[in-house]
Image: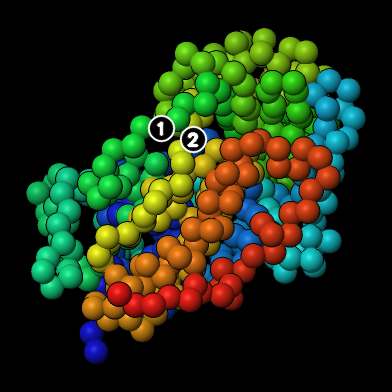
Amino acid sequence: MAKLSVAIIGAGLGGLATAAALRRAGVEVNVYEQASKFTRLGAGIQIGCNAMKVLRAFGLEPVLRAAAFYPRSWNNKEYDTGDVRFDMIFGPPAEERYGAPYLLGHRGDLHAALASVVPAEHVHLDHRVIDIAQQANGQVTLNFANGKAVTADAVVAADGVHSFVKKRLFGRDEPNFTGRIAYRTVFPAELLGGYPIDDCTKWWGPDRHIVIYYVKPDRSEVYFVTSQPEPGFTVESWSAMGDVNELRQAFADFHPQVCHVLQSCPSVHKWALVDRDPLPRWSAGNITLLGDACHPMTPYMAQGAAMAIEDAAVLSRCLEGVERGGVADAFRRFEATRKPRTSRVQLSSRTNTWLKNPTDPDWVYGYDAWNAPLAEFEAA
């Protein structure tokens, strides 16, 4: 029996995790990415225990432990006094409770780790999809802006919040601009001048917050990300630059630790925070969406990438041993299994209350995508 062939659109975290998971399940994969090269975005990422359980199966745990920071907690404090609202303990206690570590890393390091487990010959850069068509036999043909075309048994669209495939399958949906913006940056900790900061803290103000943490095990790099109101700003781009002086002014009444970090950072990126409602459907025939393409969410639970990584593991379980004729049913089972969880995280994240007060996080960090029950499903 010939291997099932799957084309994955997008070589971000979700796309590469899907490629790694499907290869593990014996599926033939090729990844098509519109960028001409990978760039190391200046962004931190929280790798939750739930995501680490998936990444461990790819052999990446030693790499990520060596590259990322192992925090004692995610501490939630009052913006001005520093009084503790809720200190979510991580480190060894969380690792013992949830079966995997909680790590704070650089997004580029996680991306590089995932890229290392997908053979380079299966990742095709400079391939921007301009057309997608499903054939009568179930196969799917992709056409690219560079003039090339490929046909596969199935397509997984991990092409992000602006997904071309989502628009083609289900029409265009406008994002809900929240009226809030975020600043973020990674910078060398030596710029702090020896000033001590917490491992990982979210400082909660009346209408804004800032999260600050280390992203390297030797504390050599610091990351922060903010959220604050600015209704007129609607640039949804991770590469747009912001005015660091405006940022400092916006947090001028915060704790001295916050002010020192902001005074020390040399530059920042700025983007508009948007929200989208859960999609009614993720798949059509032998084409499915995955990750931000079908369940984009605000960053307030630090679970967006984790949901895509979980998706990858569950999708691989649904497709294992499936032939082309069974793909559509496998995709529907994938959606039925994942949608209740991703919708709950989407809607919980929207409220921006995660860990603000004492919280039971077991439902998030205790999830194991390799062993969670697959949905009971009647084939069409």
At a point 67% along the width and 10% down the height, the residue shown is 249
Check disc 2: other Cα within 10 Å, few if <14, some if 14-19, many if 20+: many
Given the image, on which type of amino acid does mark 2 rest? Asp
Given the image, on which type of amino acid does mark 1 rest? Pro
135, above or below 240, in the image: below
Residue 56 appearing in the image: no
x and y percent of residue 183 in the render? Answer: 57, 25
Quarter of the N terminus within the rendering: bottom left
Q: How is the image coloured?
A: rainbow
- Which comes before the other along the chain, label 1 or label 2? 1
For residue 77, which quarter of the picture? top right
Closer-to-camera residue (341/196): 341
x and y percent of residue 204 in the render? Answer: 76, 28
Q: Label 2: which residue?
A: 275
205, above or below 320, in the image: above
Q: Label 1: which residue?
A: 175
Check disc 1: other Cα within 10 Å, few if <14, some if 14-19, many if 20+: some
At a point 71% along the width and 37% down the height, the residue shown is 353
Asked if the residue at tag 2 contacts the one at tag 1, i.e. Cβ–Cβ closer than 8 Å, the answer is yes
x and y percent of residue 245 in the render? Answer: 61, 10
Cα gap from disc 1 to disc 2, whole angstroms = 6 Å
